[in-house]
Image (spheres, rainbow, N blue to C red):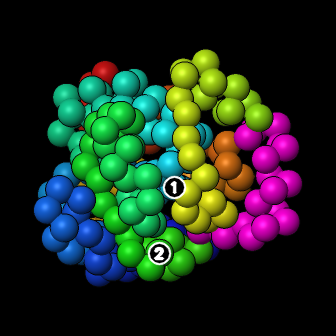
Amino acid sequence: MSVTELDSTIGNTLVTRVTDNTDVPIRSLYSNQPAVLIFLRRFGCQLCRSYALKLSNELHPILKQNNIAFIGIGLERFGLEEFQKENYFSGDLYIDEGKKAYQTLGLPYLGWFKGITDLFLRSTKAWNDETKKMGVQGNLKGDGFQLGATYVVGPNDGKVWLAHPQKDYGDHPSVDEIIKALRDNIPDFHE
């Protein structure tokens, strides 16, 4: 599914803010400022944790400096407490109960066979090596076959500046790709 603006696709979809268990429409996450939205596979996934940590360390300071929201959206609560306790993500966290946004966006669900074979792909192995170097560990609790995505969106209508749905477990946009999307769309963006 090609998504050019989030508002018409998932803007009205409710997600639960982790800090106070309040349901808010996704539109509210980018209505007043640009946002980087990370749809995480699982809070317990070590590859997701290392990606979240990498973005938190390398990207989030630049986002704060430019008043850009940094949002993580998970599909269930399994592993959330540990994810927060270990400070893998420095942005705001939300839960998409029932995977409504994931499904509407058409984010792939791998199933058993593809889910197992994707463990042996080059990109998954490469990201797993990076994860080991970072010392990040995970668990197998929860839905392990749902893939996530990274979106960089503009304020108001949620025009998509970068859409990167995962093709496999190790498929993530680089920090440089995210920064380029922001730099190309925000005239006074500074690093």
State yes or no: residue 101 in magenta. Answer: no
How far is disc 1 from disc 2 in space, using C-alphas?
12 Å
- Label 2, secondary structure: give it: helix
Where is residue 97? Give x, y as percent.
38, 75
Measuring 82% from the left and 63% from the top, which residue is drawn there?
A: 114
Residue 135, percent across and down?
A: 54, 22
Classify residue 173 by image quadrant.
top right
Q: At 54% from the left edge and 21% from the top edge, which residue is drawn?
A: 134
- The C terminus: image quadrant: top left
- Quadrant the N terminus occupies: bottom right
Left or right: residue 4 versus residue 11 is: right
Please tell me which of labels 1 and 2 falls first in the chain.
1
Check disc 1 and give the amino acid type. Answer: Arg
Q: On the rendered structure, is 116 left or right of 6?
A: right
- Give the residue type that dot 2 points to: Lys
Above or below, 45 against 55 in this view is below
Q: Is residue 17 visible?
A: yes
Instruction: Tell me where the magenta segment starts and ends, as one range.
Output: 107-124
Which residue does the numbered mark 1 point to in the structure image?
42
Magenta: main secondary structure equals helix
Using the image, tell me which numbered label, if any, was put on residue 99.
Answer: 2
Q: Position of residue 164 (x, y in %)?
A: 56, 53
- Which residue appears at 84% of the width and 44% of the height? 120
Residue plotted at (61% across, 52% down): 140
Which type of secondary structure does the marked residue at label 1 adopt? loop
Location of residue 37 with respect to 120 vertically, above or below: below
